[in-house]
Image: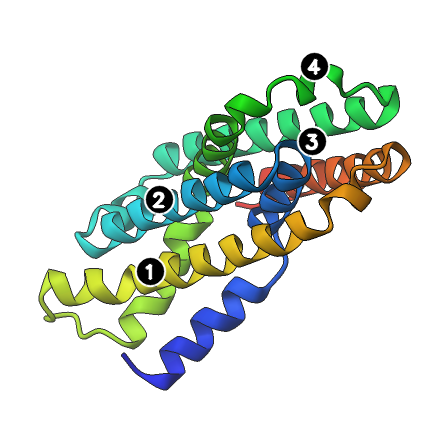
């Protein structure tokens, strides 16, 4: 594993995006465990995508346009659903029901992270663009897999650290006015991410 590969992976995982937004919101809404569960869901989805690319299935998904489009539109739908839900919470300012579900926070967090990431077909494109630069075409599958899994490994550690850091400021951030502002901003961003994914071809 080269220094160049590690540098690229670190730069990619530090770029703000849907993953960080999901961990931030779920940590604030449902607590530390939910934030960590969201990170683990994202990591598992990314690991599955990495494995599929390593054994050649990822290239098939990208090449078969109908399959790619189905995955993409599932992702668009889920992002819009999450974004609209956050905006509705921001407008109403009512959180009693959501706060009552904290016991299920880990389950909801893991689901959100897993679904948001697994329905993003652009991750297949990312792996297909990155890995061949560092792995020869004739290299064993295990070599491809070991290198590919470094991406979700580093990414998951970063997101877990982010969840722990956000949790430290949770009491301040959960004030109703702050919470509504965060919900409004995150809702708009999720809708924007969904619309951007819808426009991509």
Of the pair 43 and 69, the residue shown nearer to us: 43
For numbered disc 2, what is the local secondary structure?
Answer: helix
At horizontal 78% and vertical 28% (from top left) the residue drawn is 87
Gap between marks 2 and 1 measured at Cα: 18 Å
Q: Residue extending furthest bottom?
A: 3
Q: Position of residue 82 (x, y in %)?
A: 64, 28
What colour scheme has been applied to the protein in the rendered image?
Answer: rainbow
At horizontal 43% and vertical 55% (from top left) the residue drawn is 156
For numbered disc 4, what is the local secondary structure?
Answer: helix
Q: Tell me if label 3 and label 1 are in contact, CB under 8 Å.
A: no
Gap between marks 2 and 4 measured at Cα: 28 Å
At horizontal 19% and vertical 52% (from top left) the residue drawn is 56
Using the rendered view, name the quadrant where residue 83 is placed.
top right
Q: Tell me if label 3 and label 2 are in contact, CB under 8 Å.
A: no
Dot label at residue 83 = 3
Task: Bin the neighbour count of mark 3 within 10 Å (Cα to Cα): few under 14, some 14-19, many 20 and up.
Answer: many
Gap between marks 1 and 4 measured at Cα: 42 Å
Q: Tell me if label 1 and label 4 are in contact, CB under 8 Å.
A: no
Q: Position of residue 62 (x, y in %)?
A: 35, 46
Numbered disc in front, either 3 or 1: 3
Of the pair 99 and 64, the residue shown nearer to us: 99
Task: Bin the neighbour count of mark 2 within 10 Å (Cα to Cα): few under 14, some 14-19, many 20 and up.
Answer: many
Q: Where 76 sits versus 27, above or below?
A: above
The residue carrying mark 4 is 97
The residue carrying mark 1 is 128
Gap between marks 3 and 2 measured at Cα: 22 Å
The residue carrying mark 2 is 44
């Amino acid at each position: 594993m080269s220094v160049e590969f590690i540098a690229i992976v670190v730069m990619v995982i530090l770029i703000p995006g849907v993953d960080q937004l999901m961990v931030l919101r779920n940590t604030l809404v449902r607590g530390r465990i939910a934030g960590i569960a969201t990170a683990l869901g994202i990591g598992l989805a990314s690991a599955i995508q990495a494995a599929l690319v390593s054994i050649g299935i990822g290239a098939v998904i990208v090449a078969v346009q109908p399959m790619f489009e189905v995955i993409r539109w599932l992702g668009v739908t889920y992002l819009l659903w999450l974004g609209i839900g956050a905006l509705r919470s921001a407008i109403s300012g009512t959180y009693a029901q959501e706060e009552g579900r904290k016991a299920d926070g880990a389950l909801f967090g893991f689901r959100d992270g897993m679904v948001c990431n697994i329905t993003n077909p652009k991750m297949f494109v990312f792996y297909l663009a990155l890995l061949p630069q560092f792995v020869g075409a004739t290299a064993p599958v295990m070599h491809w897999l070991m290198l590919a899994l470094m991406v979700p490994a580093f990414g998951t550690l970063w997101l877990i650290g982010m969840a722990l850091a956000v949790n430290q400021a949770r009491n301040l951030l959960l004030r109703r006015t702050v919470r509504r502002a965060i919900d409004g901003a995150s809702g708009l961003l999720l809708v924007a991410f969904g619309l951007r994914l819808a426009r991509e071809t």
